[in-house]
Image (spheres, grey):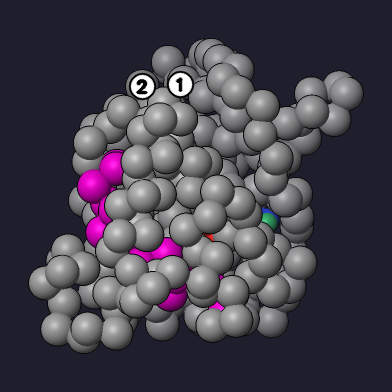
Amino acid sequence: MPLRELKDPALLGVGMTSQRTRDRMAGRLEEAGITDERVLDTLRREPRHLFLDEALSHRAYEDSSLPIGHGQTLSQPWIVARMSELVVAEAPQRVLEVGTGSGYQTLVLSRLVPRVFSVERIAALKERAAERLRRLSAHNVTLRLADGGHGWREAGPFDVILLTACASELPSALLDQLADGGVLITPLEDDTGQQWLTRVRRQGQHFEYQRLEPVRFVPLLQGVIR
Ligand code: SAH
């Protein structure tokens, strides 16, 4: 449901969290090369400020990543927009996100694709994200507390898998759960430690890697924190 149709006026924000501020953010993203109108519209509509602690909500529409606790970060708007563009280009039915974090990227995906599955390894983050997504009526999202390196076998295969944390080597379970013709979009580290946004396309048992642009993400870690 678009934000403006929600009954709760508090969701719209005021001042630094107002519609004007969101419009300005979308304008900057367009200048920075984001072209997909559906993505821009979604970012213009959805309340990024609700995915941060109140003390930080006035900074929600800046071009920066912001802390969400537990040493993790909400990705900067440009990265969310860029990754969402890459997802939308595939016209996918089912998407798996690894690294729910605040749930903001999850919400954006839920407005753009029919079915979203998202895995987070830190229980407290998963719970908070679940609350926000419920409040915003993102009914096509299913969350799970788990080590996303194992994927989500029962829910796959996926047309797109999106990682919002950086691995030095891709977990083979994730490649296995990619549908034929599907893509995995992820940061990947090179030998020098530089991270690159990378698109991996599956053609049967062949995986074709395409390096896009330099990025900076928190690391993909193992195990679950309850
Ligand atoms: N898309 C999120 C980004 C959060 S940062 C947002 O916009 O808020 C990346 C997240 O990935 C963190 O919450 C971190 O806990 C999670 N993460 C790291 N390794 C993981 C793993 N193996 N399985 C699931 N989540 C993981």
Q: Is residue 98 left or right of residue 105?
A: right
Residue denoted by label 1: 202
Specify which label sits upstream in the sequence, 1 or 2: 2
Quarter where residue 36 is shown: top left
Instruction: Please state the horizontal and vertical placement of residue 150, each as a whole percent of the image.
Output: 61, 51
Residue, x 47% and y 58% (percent of image)?
61
> Type of residue at label 2?
Gly
Ligand 1 quadrant assignment? bottom right
Residue at left 75%, top 57%? 222
* Quarter occupied by residue 141: bottom left
Q: Quadrant of the N terminus?
A: bottom left
Task: Please state which of residues 164 and 172 is positioned toward the viewer in this rendering.
Answer: 164
Q: Position of residue 71 (x, y in %)?
A: 76, 67
Kind of residue indicated by mark 1: Arg
Question: On the rendered structure, is 8 left or right of 77?
Answer: left
Where is the C terminus found, in terms of image quarters?
Answer: bottom right
